[in-house]
């Protein structure tokens, strides 16, 4: 693994000062943030069905009328880190059939390529302490086509593109409002909020802006019957002749807050309670004023469900604009603060907060993003950071309470508690989280995934190393990590297996943060020892040092579902699982070496991980029974099926990302290891002398700085052969990164496995396979996180054993460059996804995003990218791991003028 990232020197700007005061998750400046989910409906947490069909148990159509158990959702939402008090924006254009309170999208079964948000919004800016944030939503002026989107996608096959909102024609002639929400903190508990809506269409258009404030329902479940209260206080002048409305919010834990609204909005009070009468035909509701009372009043003109006493647990403040002229903007201002309301809440001081915090944000990112980065890449990095920060969400989930059901609710169906795999997460009763966590995507993946989170933290470390470290530690805490050592995968199945990238991320964050926080390193390393043992004990059942893992985050990359469809009588030995464990071993080795420099007690653990890596490398070469994952004929690594009796095996000759993962397992022993770590040095010397066959994965070379010792899973001869495939434009190398499946399979590929013909095909775009039923596709597209791991590994190899290695780039061109240049070129390709072309469009812009400045100024961070064109695909707000582009920009700024491979080097 590379140590190439240098720590940013301490900055002196105001936001950096706030960060230094905010090392813990409970710091004052972290109390409020955009922690409100983009989608709470359709999540596992809210699913109390016997069959585990989360999408249908609480669908979108119910969301406006049902109280959530574990969280809340909304547009441009803010909440406290405990999720008690929530603020968001609602909208109505006078034509929609429902109030726009949350994003709409298709469920997994409704989409022809899985779940899919059917909205357009962007995270424009944010600071790590959430002292400042900007958000933009594109709201159509005509009735939103809910039913039409569902029907059109149902009629499309997997071979067709998704039918998107823009395809309906609803946005033609720019008939939409751009709704900008800006929040700026005057203090940790004083948040100034401004909403500006601009009519980009050719005609006047009506608009309602409705800021909403409500308490999360904690009182209906039989565990705490205390009910907080929202109450209208009499309107008052601000001392300058203008009016304001004041809402008082009282909560037993948070204390007293006020929402102050400029002007004279119409107020609608109700309760955050389910409308059981409307949804389920119940005789009565728990309250006469359920949560959809606002929708009923505004959209349907029926005020019977709003409380005339102007009190409750939810309130909306309606600002109505009859006709916003073309090109005109309308603005409203509100302020959410604890304590006493200022005499002039919207005076000059209010304006100054926005100016000051915007200036703070500019100064902060000037310090974070290297000066040599050009304006285009700088804007991309800043947007990527903003997406990560807006993607932090409060995640509440106590599995034991969820399985058992609440005392104030009906008894949970017995099927929920069946042992896995029939039941869901029944082996994870210990898991109890109530934390702000970085999510992969605020709508399509509003839940953490352990390997996604690791990648998020590497980028977050550039702007908020304390939060990044806390996130990595959180997933290893006793209330998250399983007692047997497994890390929770994701809420749909915590028992599934994600690639073990956590140790790599821990090291990267440690380096980015200046290689100084040894307490963090010790805490993370200690818990990862348990995780490593889990892998060895559970995923290498026959002790062969060849591992299986099944899913491993890569979905439908194989000929069959590697978690559930392995042919009877066979065991799958996975090239990627085995390589991930070698990668894990070297990550742990590097951490152990660093710790041993200051505490000799860690020295022998460095030796332990040295030997584990060497054993795995030897197994990858060939086991005693002759099983091999390497094909000498093809020059590539494959998965292999091994018979239960161990007497036979069959390679699965599909050239995919699983055969490239072995390249990731590479590290260079620090030059000081021999001097400072005697146990490690002596053991390595003994192995070289007495067990030379076990040290073939150690490559000694000389270069700048003296002798280098490189640990590499792939020997030098095989390494160059795999690189030939990697840099072949007819196979893995695309203009925008490394494909996940060889493009040689454009016309399909078939192999007979255990007497059954199985096939695959290169799909550069959306998946044409229903193997996993969703929109994740590893059969061709470019996936950003593994590409970043590859560039890191290539650079590491080039620092050691590959210092003199020249590679053909691209394969067959006769153009040879040093490996470092090839790594630079791959990074350039990845970053170029987000660089505007001459027409203003970025290669990564999704197909349905329009042209012109209203679209082109907003980069989109997609889940993955078309293997030929680079078009963004899958989840459209995956500024989780795709935000790694900011990591690349801030670590080694690419040459923005380099559009062709560099000239040959001697």
Image: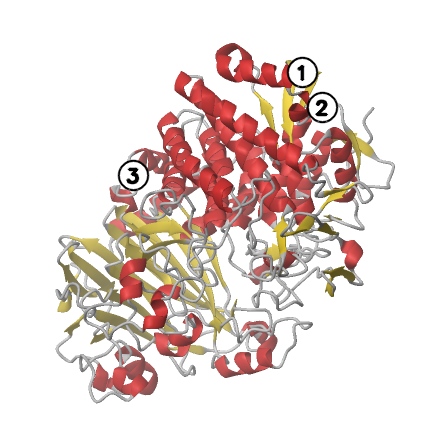
Provide residue 306's location: percent of width, then percent of height: 21, 80
Q: Earlier in the sequence, mark 2 or mark 1?
A: 1
The numbered disc on residue 704 is 1
Provide residue 796's location: percent of width, then percent of height: 63, 29
Q: Earlier in the sequence, mark 2 or mark 3?
A: 3
Q: Could you tell whether 84 is left or right of 116 in the image?
A: left
Q: Which residue, given by chain and number where applicable, does mark 3 sit on? A: 24
Residue 340 visible, this angle: yes
Distance from the alpha carbon under mark 1 to that under mark 3: 41 Å
Q: Could you tell whether 265 is left or right of 772 in the image?
A: left
- Callout 3 crowding tier (Cα within 10 Å): few <14, some 14–19, many ≥20: some
Q: Which residue, given by chain and number where applicable, does mark 2 sit on? A: 803
Q: Could you tell whether 806 is left or right of 638 in the image?
A: right
Screen quadrant of the C terminus: top right
Q: Nearer the viewer, residue 570 or 210?
A: 570
Screen quadrant of the N terminus: top right
Distance from the alpha carbon under mark 2 to that under mark 3: 42 Å
Q: Nearer the viewer, residue 616 or 198?
A: 616
């Amino acid at each position: 693994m590379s140590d190439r990232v240098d720590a940013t020197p301490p900055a002196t700007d105001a936001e950096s000062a706030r960060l230094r005061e905010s090392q813990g998750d409970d710091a004052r400046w972290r109390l409020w943030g955009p922690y409100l989910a983009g989608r709470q409906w359709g999540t596992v947490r809210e699913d109390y069905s016997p069959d585990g069909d989360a999408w249908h148990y609480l669908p979108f159509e119910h969301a406006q009328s049902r109280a959530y158990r574990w969280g809340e959702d909304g547009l441009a939402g803010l909440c406290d880190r405990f999720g008690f008090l929530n603020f968001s924006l609602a909208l109505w254009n006078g034509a929609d059939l429902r109030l726009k309170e949350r994003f709409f999208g298709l469920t997994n079964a409704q989409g022809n390529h899985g779940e899919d948000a059917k909205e357009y919004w962007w995270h424009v800016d944010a600071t790590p302490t959430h002292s400042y944030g900007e958000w933009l939503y594109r709201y159509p002026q005509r009735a939103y086509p809910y039913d039409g989107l569902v029907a059109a996608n149902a009629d499309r096959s997997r071979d067709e593109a998704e039918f998107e909102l823009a395809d309906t024609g609803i946005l033609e002639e720019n008939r939409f409002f751009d709704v900008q929400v800006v929040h700026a903190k005057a203090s940790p508990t004083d948040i100034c909020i401004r909403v500006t809506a601009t009519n980009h269409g050719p005609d006047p258009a009506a608009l309602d802006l409705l800021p909403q404030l409500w308490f999360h329902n904690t009182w209906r479940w039989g565990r705490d019957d205390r009910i907080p209260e929202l109450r209208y206080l009499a309107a008052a002048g601000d001392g300058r002749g203008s009016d304001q409305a004041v809402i008082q919010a009282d909560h037993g834990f948070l204390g007293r807050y006020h929402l102050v609204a400029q002007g004279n909005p119409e107020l609608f009070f109700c309760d955050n309670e389910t409308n059981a009468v409307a949804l389920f035909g119940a005789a009565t509701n728990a309250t006469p004023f359920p949560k959809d009372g606002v929708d009923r009043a505004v959209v349907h003109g029926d005020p019977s469900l709003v409380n005339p006493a102007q009190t409750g647990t939810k309130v909306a403040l309606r600002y109505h604009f009859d006709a916003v002229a073309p090109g005109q903007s309308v603005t409203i201002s509100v302020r959410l603060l604890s304590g006493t309301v200022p005499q002039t809440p919207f005076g000059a001081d209010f304006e100054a907060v926005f100016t000051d915090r915007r200036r703070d944000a500019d100064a902060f990112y000037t310090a974070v993003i290297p000066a040599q980065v050009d304006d285009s890449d700088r804007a991309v990095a800043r947007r990527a950071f903003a997406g990560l920060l807006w993607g932090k969400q409060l995640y509440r989930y106590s599995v034991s309470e969820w399985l058992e059901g609440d005392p104030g609710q009906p008894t949970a169906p017995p099927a929920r508690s069946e042992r896995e795999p029939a039941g869901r997460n029944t082996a994870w009763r210990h898991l109890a989280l109530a934390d702000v966590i970085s999510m992969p995507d605020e709508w399509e993946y509003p839940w953490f995934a352990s390997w996604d989170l690791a990648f998020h933290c590497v980028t977050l470390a550039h702007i908020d190393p304390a939060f990044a470290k806390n996130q990595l530690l959180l997933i290893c805490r006793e209330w998250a990590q399983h007692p047997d050592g497994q890390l929770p995968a994701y809420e749909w199945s915590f028992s599934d297996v994600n690639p073990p990238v956590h140790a790599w991320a821990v090291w990267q964050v440690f380096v980015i943060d200046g290689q100084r926080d040894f307490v963090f390193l010790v805490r993370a390393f200690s818990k990862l020892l348990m995780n490593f043992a889990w892998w060895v004990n559970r995923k290498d059942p026959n002790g062969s040092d060849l591992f299986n893992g099944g899913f491993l985050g890569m979905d439908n990359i194989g000929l069959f579902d590697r978690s559930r469809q392995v042919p009877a009588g066979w065991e799958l030995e996975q090239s990627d699982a085995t390589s991930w464990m070698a990668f894990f071993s070297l990550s742990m080795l590097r951490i152990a070496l660093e710790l041993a420099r200051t505490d000799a007690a860690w020295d022998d653990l460095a030796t332990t991980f040295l030997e584990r890596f060497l054993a795995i490398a030897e197994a990858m070469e060939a086991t005693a029974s002759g099983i091999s994952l390497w094909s000498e004929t093809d020059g590539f690594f494959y998965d292999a099926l091994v018979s239960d009796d161990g007497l036979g095996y069959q390679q699965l000759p599909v050239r995919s990302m699983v055969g490239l993962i072995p390249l990731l397992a590479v590290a260079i022993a620090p030059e000081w290891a021999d001097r400072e770590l005697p146990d490690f040095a002596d053991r390595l010397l003994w192995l070289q002398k007495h067990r030379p066959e076990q040290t073939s994965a150690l490559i000694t070379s000389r270069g700048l700085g003296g002798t280098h010792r490189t640990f590499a899973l792939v020997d030098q001869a095989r390494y160059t052969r795999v690189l030939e495939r990697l840099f072949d434009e007819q196979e893995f190398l695309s203009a925008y990164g490394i494909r996940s499946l060889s493009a040689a399979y454009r016309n399909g590929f078939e192999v007979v496995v255990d007497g059954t013909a199985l096939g695959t095909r290169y799909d550069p775009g959306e998946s044409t396979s229903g193997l996993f039923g969703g929109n994740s596709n590893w059969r061709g597209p470019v996936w950003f996180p593994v590409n970043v791991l590859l560039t890191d590994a290539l650079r590491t190899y080039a620092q050691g054993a590959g210092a003199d290695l020249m590679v053909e780039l691209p394969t067959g061109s006769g153009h040879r460059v040093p490996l470092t240049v090839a790594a630079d070129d791959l990074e350039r390709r990845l970053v170029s996804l987000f660089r505007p072309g001459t027409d203003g469009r970025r290669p990564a812009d999704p197909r349905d995003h329009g042209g012109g400045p209203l679209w082109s100024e907003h980069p989109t961070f997609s889940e993955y990218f078309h293997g030929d064109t680079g078009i963004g695909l899958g989840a459209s707000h995956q500024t989780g791991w795709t935000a790694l582009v900011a990591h690349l920009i801030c670590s080694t700024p690419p040459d923005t003028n380099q559009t062709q491979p560099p000239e040959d080097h001697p």
